[in-house]
Image (tube, rainbow, N blue to C red):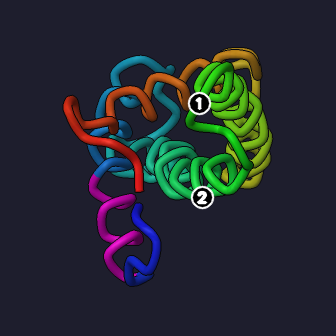
Amino acid sequence: MSRGEPFLRTLTRSSVVAGVLGLVLLLALPRHASVFSDFVDVFAVAFCFAFLAPYVDQLLLALPGIRIGVGPAVRVVGWFAGGLWCSVIARWLWMQLGRDLRDLPGLMWGGVLLVVLELVARKPGTSDQ
């Protein structure tokens, strides 16, 4: 997400990423009902990460000195912390959908997932705006 990106573009990109991530999660998490119902559940979890990740990164990029010195390491730690919050939201949604929290991995894996998503989202050879 770049500064000034239209919300609809962010929403569309997040939905596509959540759809792909949802397919992976559909294979990894235990089945509950029909394939469609299970996909809706995992899509909701994946959307928490895909939609909130760019906003977490924008907050981190607003910190002074984040691009120099130890700033990049602080940014990765910030991604991890943001992933923990995304995981809390995703787990709440999971419960609202009538699913068992024991089906999901621990909160720590939410941090790992967001770090991986952000690293994959970085285009080699480009700098952040």
Mark 2 in CB contact with mark 1 (< 8 angstroms):
no
- Relative to 76, say whether 62 is above or below: below
* Image position of 61 (left or right of 89): left
For the point 40% across and 71% down, the residue is: 11
* Main secondary structure along the magenta-highlighted residues: helix
**Residue pointed to by mark 1:** 68
User: Please, what secondary structure does the residue beneath circle 2 have?
Assistant: helix
Q: Residue at x 56, y 36 (%)?
A: 67
In the displayed structure image, the side of residue 72 where residue 17 appears, left or right: left
Q: Which residues are magenta?
A: 8-16
* Residue 128 part of the magenta-drawn span: no
Mark carried by residue 4: none
State which quadrant residue 7 falls in.
Answer: bottom left
63, above or below 99, in the image: below
Mark before the other along the chain sequence, 2 or 1: 2
Amino acid carrying label 2: it is Tyr
Q: Residue at x 20, y 32 (%)?
A: 125
Judge the density around disc 1: few (<14), some (14-19), many (≥20) Cα neighbours within 10 Å.
Answer: few
Q: Where residue 55 is drawn, which disc sits there?
A: 2
Name the spot of residue 14 as percent of width and height, x first.
39, 58
Towards the viewer: 39 or 51: 51
User: Does the image show residue 116?
Assistant: yes
Residue depicted at x 66% and y 28%: 71
The C terminus, quarter of image: bottom left
Q: Amino acid at mark 1?
A: Ile
The residue nearer to you, when weighing 26 against 127, is 127
- The image shows residue 74, relative to residue 15, as above or below, that is above
Secondary structure under the numbered disc 1 in the rendered image:
loop
Any part of residue 99 in sight: no
> Which image quadrant: the N terminus?
bottom left
* Percent of width and height locating residue 35: 33, 41
**Place of residue 97 in the rendered image (x, y in percent of width and height, measured from the top left):** 67, 52
